[in-house]
C-alpha cells in the first residue's frame, strides 16, 4: 500500500507574506463589556457587533474574543450536548482572540468546496480532493468527521461514517484511496485516518449519544490488532506495512491513546503513548523538525512510495505533528509534549519575524533546505496552522497571533481563497482543523 499522496502546494512566498500580514487587527480592550445589541470594547479599542454578541476580556491588556450563542448558527444539530460554539479553554494553553462567526464561515467554506452528498447505497457523504480528479482518501473522511462532530453537524458526520464503512477492508479498516466513481484504487488502511475516525466516534457518543461509542470501541480494537506492532507497540502506518522499521511520526496521537485505553480497558495503548514519545524524542533534534517517515530510532527513512523522495525530511506529512502533540500537553499536561512543542514553535517563530511568508514548505532536521523538491515554496496552512497550535502553551504570542489571523483570513476571504494553493483540500482541511483548538472547539468530550 502507498500512503495518501500529498499534492505539492505551490505558493509564492511574497504572496503568502501579503496574506499573513494584511489581516484585520485583533481588538484589544481593558475587559470590554457586552451590550444589548452589539459589542462595546474596552478603553484600549473597540468594535461593533450585531445580534447581542458577547465580549470576553482578559483583565485589562489582553485580546478580546467575540463569540455568539449556538442559536446564532443554523448548522447546529438539535439535541447536542455541546452545540457550537464552546470556547472550551485549556488550563495550560491560553487561547488567542477569535471570532465564532469567522470559524463558522471557515467551516461552511470548507464544507461547500470539499463535501459531497451521494449514495452508497444509503444516503452518505464524502470529502473529495478536487486537485486529484475528485478522488477520496480515508484521511479526508476522518478530517470531515472530526470537523463535523465539533461543529455539531450530525448530518455530515453520519454521511461520512456511512461512506467509510462501505469502503472497509477485511480487517474492519477503511481502504485508504477511493476513486471518484467509488472504486477502491488504493487498498489497505492508513492509521492516521482510522484513529481520527475512532476519536470522532467517541466524541460523537458524547455529543449525540446512540451507538457511536460501540462503533468506536470496535474500530479501536481493529486498530490495535492490525496497526500496532506487537512487542514494540510502535504504531504501524497501515495494516499491511511498517512498524519499527518504518513509521510516520505525524500519525502519533498520544492524547487519543490515553482515551482509547480508558474506553477499551486495554492498557496496552499506554505503551503506544510511550513508544510514540520515545521515537519523537529521538527524531525531533534541536528544532522539532521530525522526518515524514522514520524508524523507531528516530532516523528518517524512505517513504513507502518509490516516487516520494521526501521521506527523510520535514514536509507535507510531518508538518501535522505539532497539532497532535499539542493536544496532549494542553489536555493532559504531558511534559514530553511541551519539550517538543517548545522546539517547533521556537523554530517557526524564528523563521517568521515579520510574517508567515518566510516559512518554507520543507526542512532538514538542521533547518536547511532538503536536497529534494521540498523547501522551494512558502508554507501554507498545513504547516503554519499546526505550528500555531504548537504555540498555544505560550512564549510566542506574536507568532500565534499571526497564525490565527492568517488562518481566519485564508479560510474566509474570497480574494485570498481564490489564489492558487491557498484553499486546496489539504491546506484548507488543516486550516479548519487548526482553528478548532485555537478557538476552544476541539477537546476531549469523554467524561
Image (cartoon, helix red, strand yellow):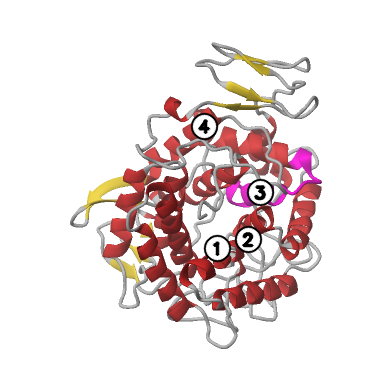
For the residues labelled 3 and 4, the Cα–Cα distance comes to 19 Å
Is residue 379 magenta-colored? yes
Q: Give residue 80's position: percent from left, percent from top.
A: 40, 41
Residue 389: mark in rendering: 3
Q: Are dots 2 and 4 in contact, CB under 8 Å?
A: no
Residue 256: mark in rendering: 1
For the residues labelled 3 and 2, the Cα–Cα distance comes to 10 Å
Depicted 53 relative to depicted 183: above or below: above
Instruction: Tell me if mark 4 has few (under 14), some (14-19) or many (20+) residues whose alpha carbon lies within 10 angstroms of its own.
Output: many
Q: Nearer the viewer, mark 1 or mark 4?
A: 1
Is residue 49 magenta-colored? no
Give the structural element (helix, strand or loop) at label 4. loop
Instruction: Tell me if mark 3 has few (under 14), some (14-19) or many (20+) residues whose alpha carbon lies within 10 angstroms of its own.
Output: many
For the residues labelled 2 and 4, the Cα–Cα distance comes to 25 Å
What residue does disc 2 label? Answer: 321
Which of 118 and 423 lies nearest the eye of the viewer?
Answer: 118
What residue does disc 4 label? Answer: 412
Which range is magenta? 378-399
Q: Give residue 269's position: percent from left, percent from top.
A: 55, 74
Q: Which mark is first along the chain, 4 or 3?
A: 3
Q: Are dots 3 and 2 in contact, CB under 8 Å?
A: no
Q: Is residue 267 left or right of residue 92?
A: left
Q: Which mark is first along the chain, 4 or 2?
A: 2
Give the structural element (helix, strand or loop) at label 2. helix
Q: Which mark is first along the chain, 4 or 1?
A: 1
Q: Give residue 362's position: percent from left, percent from top.
A: 66, 59
Q: Give residue 388's position: percent from left, percent from top.
A: 68, 46
Residue 323: mark in rendering: none
Of all residues, the one furthest to the bottom in this rendering is 231
Q: Nearer the viewer, mark 1 or mark 2?
A: 1
Amino acid at each position: 500500500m502507498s500512503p495518501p499522496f500529498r499534492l505539492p502546494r505551490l505558493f509564492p512566498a511574497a504572496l503568502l507574506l501579503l496574506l499573513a500580514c494584511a489581516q484585520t487587527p485583533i481588538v484589544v480592550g481593558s475587559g470590554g463589556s457586552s451590550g444589548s445589541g452589539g459589542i462595546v470594547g474596552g478603553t484600549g479599542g473597540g468594535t461593533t457587533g450585531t445580534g447581542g454578541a458577547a465580549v470576553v476580556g482578559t483583565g485589562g491588556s489582553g485580546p478580546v474574543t467575540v463569540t455568539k450563542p449556538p442559536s446564532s448558527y443554523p448548522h447546529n444539530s438539535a439535541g447536542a450536548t455541546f452545540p457550537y460554539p464552546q470556547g472550551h479553554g485549556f488550563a495550560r494553553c491560553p487561547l488567542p482572540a477569535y471570532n465564532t462567526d469567522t470559524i463558522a464561515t471557515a467551516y461552511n467554506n470548507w464544507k461547500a468546496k470539499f463535501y459531497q452528498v451521494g449514495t452508497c447505497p444509503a444516503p452518505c457523504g464524502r470529502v473529495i480532493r478536487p486537485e486529484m480528479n475528485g478522488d477520496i482518501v480515508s484521511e479526508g473522511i476522518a478530517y470531515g468527521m472530526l470537523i463535523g462532530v465539533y461543529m455539531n453537524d450530525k448530518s455530515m458526520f453520519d454521511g461520512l461514517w456511512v461512506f467509510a464503512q462501505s469502503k472497509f477492508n477485511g480487517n474492519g479498516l477503511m481502504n485508504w484511496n477511493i476513486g471518484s466513481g467509488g472504486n477502491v484504487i488504493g487498498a489497505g488502511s492508513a492509521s492516521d485516518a482510522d484513529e481520527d475516525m475512532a476519536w470522532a466516534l467517541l466524541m460523537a457518543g458524547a455529543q449525540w449519544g446512540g451507538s457511536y461509542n460501540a462503533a468506536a470501541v470496535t474500530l479501536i480494537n481493529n486498530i490495535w490488532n492490525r496497526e500496532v506492532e506487537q512487542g514494540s507497540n510502535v504504531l504501524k502506518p497501515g495494516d499491511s506495512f511498517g512498524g519499527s522499521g518504518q513509521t510516520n511520526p505525524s500519525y502519533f496521537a498520544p492524547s487519543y491513546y490515553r482515551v482509547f485505553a480508558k474506553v477499551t480497558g486495554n492498557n496496552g495503548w499506554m505503551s503506544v503513548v510511550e513508544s510514540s514519545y520515545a521515537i519523537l524524542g529521538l527524531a525531533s533534534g534541536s528544532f522539532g523538525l521530525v522526518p515524514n517517515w522514520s524508524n523507531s530510532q528516530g532516523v528518517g527513512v524512505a517513504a513507502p512510495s518509490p516516487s516520494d523522495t521526501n521521506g527523510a525530511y520535514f514536509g507535507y506529512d510531518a508538518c501535522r505533528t505539532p497539532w497532535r502533540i499539542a493536544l496532549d500537553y494542553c489536555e493532559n499536561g504531558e511534559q514530553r509534549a511541551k519539550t517538543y512543542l517548545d522546539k517547533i514553535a521556537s523554530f517557526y517563530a524564528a523563521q517568521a519575524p515579520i510574517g508567515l511568508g518566510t516559512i518554507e514548505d520543507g526542512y532538514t532536521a538542521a533547518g536547511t533546505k532538503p536536497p529534494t523538491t521540498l523547501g522551494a515554496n512558502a508554507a501554507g496552512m498545513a504547516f503554519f496552522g499546526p505550528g500555531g497550535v504548537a504555540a498555544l502553551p505560550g512564549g510566542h504570542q506574536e507568532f500565534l497571533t499571526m497564525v490565527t489571523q492568517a488562518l481566519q483570513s485564508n479560510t474566509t476571504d474570497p480574494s485570498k481563497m481564490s489564489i492558487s494553493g491557498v484553499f486546496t483540500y489539504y491546506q484548507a482541511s488543516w486550516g479548519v482543523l487548526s482553528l478548532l483548538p485555537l478557538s476552544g472547539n476541539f477537546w476531549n468530550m469523554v467524561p
